Amino acid sequence: KACYSWSLLLLSMLFLSLISANNAQKSDEVSMGTTILAVRYKGGVVVGADTRTSVSGYVSNRYAAKLTFVLDREVDEFVTYANSSPHMPSVDASTCVICRSGSAADTQHLASVIRTELVSRQLLYRIRGTVTHVASLLRNLLANEPSLSASLICAGYDGELGRGVIYTITPGGTVFEEKAWAAGGSGSTYILGHLDSCHPKDELGMDSNDQILNSEEEALDFVSKALSLAMDRDGSSGGFIRMYVINKDGKRFVSRFVDKSNERRNSEDSVASRLSLRHFAPAVTRKSSPPAKLN
């Protein structure tokens, strides 16, 4: 009986130590609970993300960069010129960005591996990478390493297709091509209804994934408005809005700060005007009767 009790005690202590170690490992992991968004327009793609990184409930970084470029037109054209060949096909250079959500360490590792692989292919085999190549490489990495915590959006301008492309990659390695927009991160659940309501409609007034925005300004307003709404509700999203416009000419950085003071003041004024009792029960004026005449 003594041996049996001692064995039970040792097993219970071992079980508790494993649980505590597992919880400590999860709590110390830097999480990118975030909001990432990509939307297509007729000239390319606009991507955006917030800048907050947290460890459990602690904000570890307020200015984190969650948009990592693995294909840059300016850098890749220089590499191509240095390793040029008359037999190399003339294809427009692609620009691709990985919008990262999940574990910061895992997503940074994935982006570094993808960038190294693409540069090696271009130097050794003279093959220019595209957005589709990036999505395929990410799928293989996530499928072979299921322990990685990463939910990604791969977006950019594909030189071979000649248009903007958006792919979503799940933690298991499943790849989906999105026709109009893609959202990810913890804050995306708060804005899905807003994204659907602001989605372009076809001639019959029905939602259609083939409908995309017309101009770059519409795409920027679409992304900034959705991200600001997500940052209002999601505790893991915050900071400011970092966006990039990606088209056939490369990338362009756009930053917008969320200023809620004017909007809050306007909303309070509108609520006060709606709740005003000035015209609620207007006074009833009685007509005075003419004075009586004395005969």
Image (cartoon, grey):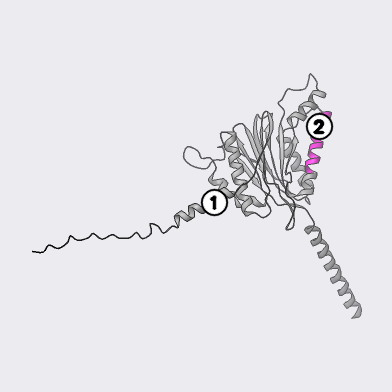
Q: Residues within 10 Å of mark 1 (few under 14, many from 20)?
A: few
Q: Is residue 191 above or below residue 133?
A: below
Q: Amino acid at mark 1?
A: Arg
Task: Kindly identify which residue carries mark 1.
Answer: 265
Residue 148 position within the rendered picture, expressed as x and y whole percent measured from the top left: 78, 50
Q: Amino acid at mark 2?
A: Arg
- Report if the CB atoms under discs 1 and 2 are less than 8 Å apart: no
91 relative to 281 in the view: left or right = right
**Residue 45 placement: quadrant:** top right
| Outermost residue to the front | 294
Residue 123 position within the rendered picture, expressed as x and y whole percent measured from the top left: 83, 29
Residue 177 position within the rendered picture, expressed as x and y whole percent measured from the top left: 65, 40
Q: CA distance from mark 1 to mark 2?
A: 55 Å
**Residue 42 placement: quadrant:** top right
96 relative to 267 in the view: left or right = right
Circle 1: element type: helix
Residue at the spot x=83%, y=62% of the render? 21
| Outermost residue to the left | 295
Looking at the image, tell me whether mark 1 or mark 2 is earlier in sequence order.
2
Residue 209 falls within the magenta-colored stretch:
no
Residue 83 visible in the displayed image: no
Q: Closer to the camera, 184 or 55? A: 55
Residue 67 position within the rendered picture, expressed as x and y whole percent measured from the top left: 72, 41
Residue at the spot x=65%, y=54% of the render? 234
Q: Nearer the viewer, mark 1 or mark 2?
A: 1
Region in magenta: 110-125
Quadrant location, the N terminus: bottom right
Residue at the spot x=77%, y=22% of the render? 88
